[in-house]
Image (cartoon, coloured by chain):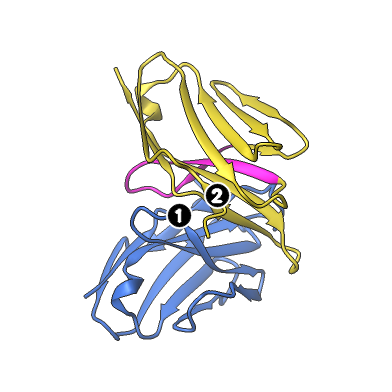
Chain colours: A yellow, B blue
Amino acid sequence: DQQVKQNSPSLSVQEGRISILNCDYTNSMFDYFLWYKKYPAEGPTFLISISSIKDKNEDGRFTVFLNKSAKHLSLHIVPSQPGDSAVYFCAASAWGNTGFQKLVFGTGTRLLVSP
Amino acid sequence: DAMVIQNPRYQVTQFGKPVTLSCSQTLNHNVMYWYQQKSSQAPKLLFHYYDKDFNNEADTPDNFQSRRPNTSFCFLDIRSPGLGDTAMYLCATSSSLGPNSPLHFGNGTRLTVT
């Protein structure tokens, strides 16, 4: 049962345009959402996050939007740069009964930004 | 630079032959995690340590065990690897258990069971 879904395995965008990566979740107990970025042969690195009490968080070229009623979040990259080409993982967390915020990841979306 | 280091980067083992993957960190983080990521799948949490407290995910196979002898090191032992254990194994750390402490990942060990 995939609780965090990234339905687009890949996305191609031209340099300078907007990249929009989407993520859907099913567990209404999730209260914190994160995006990680992964280059080939490297581990994922944290990019940006959002709490469920907010609907938008912005950090430079990166903005995450959260629509709780739709159980949907998206990552916007504006403007996109070739160096943004990577796999982007959406992740969500909820408090478990062991006092631990367990992260559940999506399967990732491969973004290719062409010059 | 403070970091999370995994060794080896690539490991090939035979079916049923025990294997140990290692992870070290210089971040002095309390929490260490092991994730398994199979091809085209999401990373899946196997277990985590908060200091020396070990927490096993309910669906982690008994074949998988872990040791954390000190703050800096954590090991993943696979007692009798099967072909289905071929995957990327990712070690990660965080300063606390809360979501405000993002995970810092190592570069992973790609394990192939033949």
Of residue B1 and residue A74, the one placed in the foreground of this image is A74
Q: Crowding at label 2, few (<14), some or many (≥20) Cα neighbours within 10 Å? A: many
- In the rendered view, would you say A80 is above or below A85? above
Q: Which mark is residue B42?
A: 1
Look at 74% across and 69% down and name the residue there: A98
Q: Position of residue B78 (x, y in %)?
A: 40, 80
Q: Chain of mark 1?
A: B
Q: Position of residue A67 (x, y in %)?
A: 67, 33
Amino acid type at mark 1: Ala
Disc 2, SS: strand
Look at 63% across and 75% down and name the residue there: B54
Main secondary-structure element of the magenta-colored stretch: strand
Q: Is residue B57 visible?
A: yes
Look at 37% across and 27% down and name the residue there: A83
The quadrant holding residue B10 is bottom left
Whether the residues at callouts 2 and 1 have beta carbons within 8 Å, the answer is yes
Look at 71% across and 49% down and name the residue there: A28
Question: Where are the magenta residues, as a range?
Answer: A32-48
Residue B34 is left or right of residue A12, and the answer is: right
Quarter of the image containing the C terminus of chain B?
A: bottom left
What residue sits right under mark 2 in the picture? A4
Q: Is residue A44 magenta?
A: yes
Amino acid type at mark 2: Val
Q: Is residue B96 visible?
A: no
Disc 1, SS: loop
- In the rendered view, would you say A67 is above or below A19? below
Of residue B1 and residue B85, the one placed in the foreground of this image is B85
Q: Position of residue B9 (x, y in %)?
A: 32, 60
Whether labels 2 and 1 belong to a single chain: the reply is no
